[in-house]
Image: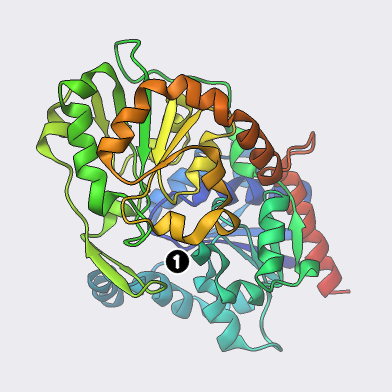
Amino acid sequence: MQRALFLFNHDAAHQVAHLAPVAAAMAREHADIETVVAFAGDAIRKRILGLIDPDDAAKITWTSLDLPPVMGAATRIFDRILPASRLARLRVHEQLFEASAAVISTERTCLRVKERLGPSRSPLFIRVPHGTGDRSVTFHPDHRKFDLSLVAGPKMAAQLAANGVDPARIEVTGYSKFERIDLAARPRFFENDNPTFVYNPHFDPYLSSWYEAGPQLLEWFASEEGQAYNLIFAPHVMLFRKSMHVSPEYKLAKRRPEVPEAALAARNVLVDVDGPRLFDMSYMLGADAYIGDASSQLYEFLVRPRAVFLLDPNGALAEQGHETLPFLSTGPSVRSVEALATELPDWAETAARFKPAQDELIAQTFALSDTPASTRAAQAIATAIRSKNG
């Protein structure tokens, strides 16, 4: 029996929701292909099981990507500056990959295995992107090496093709993360009816607003003037995983500022830097408006159009421009917390003014269909495996 290996080789769980529904659909709908889930630790497995039905989970072969104890202890030390454990797991479990017909992954470090095995021994490598963002690192040259990319909508398909990915290796299958989420929900996180903003900075030391302006923004919301609003501080989950962030693309390193004490003490500020709600869309659905920079969660927020404010203190987003970063059309960009503070009272008018641009961009970002995205993706994977093996 041919094997489809779904790879969850990450120490954080933010990528799980993009791939778990596809693995479940594969096990449920393509019984002639063995579905294997390879996971990095019990926390990741628990997150996967929380997103799929028990009947589907029972059809899956589960494999833990364990490292020998001494190696695991050593790689955890280096994880502070590079993905040492991820790379080690790929090396230690290389035979598992070689014995598979296809490896399906949300990120590109798995391509190290493809290079080592070579064309004669390598399975198909299939990418399901974790998000739909526009930042240039999203289009790393290595993405041309995947045998197939399954993307959320025509926007990313066009962006990949423009960056050298063979269009024949791109298929639009939709955004499976939405399948387990009530997109009409409005979770409440505060005991008042004041407007709620979510601040969702990225971790990239060049593109993120956190390093230059984030703590000041939290202090403003904690101040007397900011008490008219609520703030959810929900950064990209990787921002607080390290104290120092390095951007190989921009050749830049910065130390991450801490959350100011005033924000931690403020009743109108919710701070969550590592909880599960950072990636289950609770905060995106519960906010009236979004403040951010380069995170692809902006697009998840806009599945229900609302006000967006882009904080660009060093001009990094403006430098790349609308052609590279289409999300710049979704709301006003400001360079400082002071400028942002003057915009916030008009959040409702901002939402109405930018809604046409948001609607147009979201239609290009997510290919919605009566057929679930996970079913479409599983079918594409099964077709690729069967075609490879005649």
Image quadrant in which you'd find residue 157: bottom right
Q: Residue furthest right?
A: 390
User: In the visual, does 126 lie left or right of 224?
Assistant: right
Q: Nearer the viewer, residue 305 or 34?
A: 305
The C terminus - image quarter = bottom right
Q: Judging from the image, what secondary structure is the residue with disc 1 in? A: loop
Give how far across and how far down residue 133 sits, in percent. 54, 52
The answer to whether residue 387 is seen in the rendering is yes
Give how far across and how far down residue 36 sits, in percent. 61, 60
Picture colour scheme = rainbow
Q: Nearer the viewer, residue 241 or 100?
A: 241
User: In the visual, does 362 lie left or right of 319?
Assistant: right
Give how far across and how far down residue 84 sits, in percent. 34, 74
The image shows residue 157, relative to residue 376, as above or below, that is below
The three-letter code of the residue at mark 1 reads: Leu
The N terminus - image quarter = bottom right
Task: Residue at 48%, 19% (x, y): give it.
Answer: 186
The image shows residue 381, relative to residue 101, as above or below, that is above
User: In the visual, does 390 lie left or right of 76?
Assistant: right
Q: Nearer the viewer, residue 339 or 88?
A: 339
The image shows residue 37, relative to residue 327, as above or below, that is below
The answer to whether residue 59 is seen in the rendering is no
Task: Residue at 43%, 28% (x, y): give it.
Answer: 289
Q: Residues within 10 Å of mark 1 (few under 14, many from 20)?
A: many
Image quadrant in which you'd find residue 123: bottom right
Q: Nearer the viewer, residue 390 or 284?
A: 284
Q: Which residue is mark 1?
A: 65
Q: How many marks?
A: 1
Give how far across and how far down residue 144 sits, in percent. 65, 75
Task: Residue at 18%, 43% (x, y): give it.
Answer: 259
